[in-house]
Image (spheres, rainbow, N blue to C red):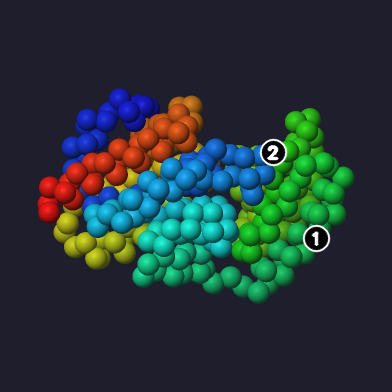
Amino acid sequence: MNHLFFQLNKLKSLLKNKFIFLFLDYDGTLTPIAQSPDKAIISRKTIEILGGLSKIPHCKVAIISGRALKDIKKKIGLEEIIYAGNHGLEIDGPKVKFKTPISLKYIIVLKKIKTILKKKLSKIRGVIIEDKGLTLSVHYRLVNTKDAWLVKTIFHEALAYYIVSNKIKTRPGKKVLEIRPVLEWDKGKIVLWLIARLKFVLGKKPFVPIYIGDDITDEDAFRALKNKGLTVFVGNPGNSHAKYYLRNTQEVSEFLEQILKIKTDENICQD
Ligand SMILES: [Mg+2]
């Protein structure tokens, strides 16, 4: 896995005169992971860069987050961007609106599970149960390290029946456990779906998809874009399916600024 900045010249020629479709995760990618989800605030500078990118005619930006759609829209607040919340279960942006049809049965089960988990995890300090509408997240970042296994054990024991009977599925992330509907819909599939829509509009014009993310759920997108686009893992290089890596959110911001510069120069040349 190569550090992205070592390849910058190669990248410049790859991105030159092509339409860029930029897919970005939020937590751990655009903003450092905070102690609790409400404290992860994106910097003004990164917002400005994203705003700049979203205004360039040859560039489209999509935020693909595990957060609820409403939450992620509010956190970024830019209009020209596509937002995919709950790992793509709900999408909103210019000319695109989508919400996965969810059965009422599932919503009732989710409510029941929320009550069960609240009760069973109430004695462990630091647990945050986040209701994201279509999914539930159990955050244990603030839990004493020695109690983290207890959270996981209670979580899996409480949900065993619902998992086995195929009513829900669970997925781990960074210090978070998520409950979601039993659907084959992940960040990889949503990215391919958005690309297919864009291709329809662009016709034969060349374009490059870029995906930047830091967590397990981003791996689906890295796999989906293998040999199709530029994939960038954020963090220490390890067992990711991404081709390149950036060390932290600061480097992500610098990279986005580079893209903005390349594309702005192009625009000026074309004028
Ligand atoms: Mg993330």
Does any atom of ligand 1 lie closer than 8 Å to the CB of label 1? no
Q: Nearer the viewer, residue 78 or 95?
A: 78
Does any atom of ligand 1 lie closer than 8 Å to the CB of label 2? no
Give the mark toward the camera: 2 or 1: 2
Tell me the distance, in whole angstroms, between the alpha carbons under discs 2 and 1.
21 Å
Q: Which residue is mark 1?
A: 115
Residue 232 in percent (x, y) is at 39, 37
**Residue 242: in sight, yes or no?**
no
Q: Left or right: where does residue 141 sit relative to residue 7?
A: right
Three-letter amino acid code at disc 1?
Thr
Q: Nearer the viewer, residue 100 or 57?
A: 57
Q: How many marks?
A: 2
Q: Nearer the viewer, residue 158 or 132?
A: 132
Q: Which residue is mark 2?
A: 141
Question: Which residue ends up furthest to the bottom in the rendered image?
Answer: 104
Residue 92 in percent (x, y) is at 45, 66
Three-letter amino acid code at disc 2?
Arg
Taking the spot 55% from the left edge, 38% from the top edge, the residue there is: 32
- Comes first in the chain, label 2 or label 1: 1
Contact? badges 2 and 1 (CB < 8 Å):
no
